[in-house]
Amino acid sequence: MNLASRSLCRASLLTALAAAVFTFGCGPKKVAPPPPQPPPPAPAAARPTVTLQASPTSINKGESATLSWNSTDATQLTISPEVGAVTAQGSTKVTPADSTTYTITATGPGGSADASARVTVNAPPPPPVAAPQPSLDELFLKEVRDAYFDYDKADIRPDARESLSKTADFLKNYPQIKVTIEGHCDERGSTEYNLGLGDRRASAVKQYIISLGISADRLSTVSYGKEKPFCMEHNESCWQQNRRGHFVKSN
Amino acid sequence: MSHIPWGVHVLNLAKCWERLFFITAMLFFVSSAAAQDWFRTGTGLGEAKSRIAIADFAARSDSAKPHASLFTQVVRDDLQFCGILDLASPSFYPPQAPSVPAELKYAAWAGPPTNANFVGFGNLSENTAEVAIEAWLQDVRSPSSQAVVGKVYRGAPTDAQVRKFAHQFADEIISKLSGGLPGVASTQIAFVSSRSGSKEIWVMDYDGANQRQLTSLKSIALTPRWSPDASRIAFTCFAPSGGLTSAQICMYSMDTGKLVSFSRFRGTNITPAWSPDGTQIIFSSSMQGNPELYVTDVGGGRPKRMTMSNGANVSPSWNPKTGQTIAFVSDRGGVPQLYLMNSDGTSATKLDLPDMGYVIDPAWTPNGQLLAFSWRRPNDNYDIYVMDAATRQFVELTRDQGRNERPSWAPDGRHIVFESTRGGARQIWTMLADGSQPHQLTAAGHNESPNWSTR
């Protein structure tokens, strides 16, 4: 039975005897009204009652709540949205994505009744408005500067001196941090030669940092040559990105 | 012997089929009287090579047909590749392929259009347990003579085994027809491939078949080098230890299929190479600060420093014949260049080339006379060159074909495997040592750093 025919059925109940319902059914077909006659004393068809409860009434996104209901004198019960037709009493779990008001409609010979229950869905807790303290990793990324090199060279350039003194200041402020200095090269040389050149670059950075007062036992080096480029294009600005001594926090 | 316009020193013409190939430049390489393989210059002039035909091998049953045709094809490919024989096209063959010597019609193969000097033929039978191949090579210009080669191969009826037998038969033919030069059809090529997601050591047959992954270190594996007996591969690995990663020398055993131990050293340890007797490893290490060359035993014990310089010293190649000379790359003069030194570390001298640029990847021929290398001349790309170590004369083998690097010689001294970007992605190619017959071996993913097995 579809919804349309169900509502037609409901309408006919208001004007016809209960027996007539059985006679004429609930079909959509229009039928001739019965001959007028004094209304018989209406049978004491009680009006349905229904209750609906949600537990808990407030959930976090992704969690479930339980809807429970109870009814009397109803022949049909429907919960919307989503749940649909249900039995006279029972319970079901719902997992609404957003806050939702569930309504149960009870229909019986004596009429219909509604009840509602709202399940509030809390949004995930917003990230802290402002991190009170940036983590050490964040500080490291912000403060530590890499050293860039000329083509085929492992000499510390003036701009690299500036970067490395900033890096050394940071390392002095956080004496618990140990670092690995990675030597990198652009793609133009051979794999093998670049591993050697990258080693010389990493060592040059290490020596310079030591000269600024950082203990050697906090520093390790590794050469990746051209095996782990930062930039993949074939032009000088990209190659410059790849010719560097790169600091990585190692503890 | 037809001669070349500007004249040539004809040396040691032991056998007519030793006339190998012709370097296309106006210079020549002088070989010692004892040398088996040699170069001569020319412009494509010279003797015809021996002409050989490989008849379709007869399948003794229907089930043997796929392996009979596989065997035939692999032998033909091997002989085509070898560079010293002229393989007659199968479309010129007589209609009847002999399956045993009694069925061979000499005149039909020796005459036109086949015009063969030699014919390879035979038959293949197979059941579920075994394949058996009878194979002969006959000189069809001398019908009365014994078969040049007569072999029976028996083994598991698998594609891999049939390929192996075909390579063995081809090598037998090449050895017989070249007066003893080793064929390379049974050799292998180690290389680096990133097709599994990280750079690992792989190995393949010399013709590119049977590509398989050896290591699964899931970091970065580089620069494989076969031991002289081909039982081990030394390579550069990135190995973590105590939370820190560094480049180290790793050693893979072909016998056990596992890594065997090699000492860890401080710093960056890369580019291992073998001494000719297989008892020592030379590699670049920054264990004392600067990347210098060190020699150790095969387990990494008793390191001995070989170079003293400013700059990076990498990519050693130990002369496999004399054991007396080590070629390597150093940027002590500003840019990477080739140097030669004695095997005790003395007398390091730069190989002077006419213009600057990068000179890298030295690789000795098995006879220790020629040095292949990669050279990026000013305003040019990397190309493969071959130099005579005695005269310092050189020829260019590749040109205008992308980046060509990391040559490695086949044990026959006639072929070079190298990496090239000529097709776009970096792939592994072979060519004859005069630069002809380029042949692509890999296609999946990126592949580099080939090293030809020593046997």
Image: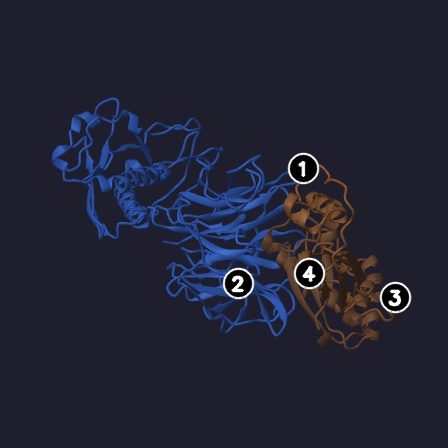
Chain letter of disc 3 in the image: A
Q: Is residue A3 visible?
A: yes
- Which one is in front in this view, the residue at disc 4 or the one at disc 2? 2
* Numbered tag placed on residue B156 in the rendering: none
Q: Residue B266, percent across and down? A: 61, 71
Q: Secondary structure at mark 1?
A: loop
Residue A222 vs B392, above or below: the answer is below
Residues marked 4 and 2 touching at CB (< 8 Å): no
- Which one is in front in this view, the residue at disc 2 or the one at disc 3? 3
Residue B205 vs B434, above or below: the answer is below
Label 2, on which residue?
A: B217
Label 3, on which residue?
A: A130
The amino acid type found where label 3 is placed reads Ala
Label 1, on which residue?
A: A29
Q: Residue A88, percent across and down? A: 68, 62
Task: Give me the C-alpha separation between circle 3 and circle 1.
Answer: 67 Å
Task: Give me the C-alpha separation between circle 2 and circle 1.
Answer: 78 Å
What is the display colour for chain A? Answer: brown
Q: Residue B354, percent across and down? A: 60, 41
- Chain with blue colouring: B
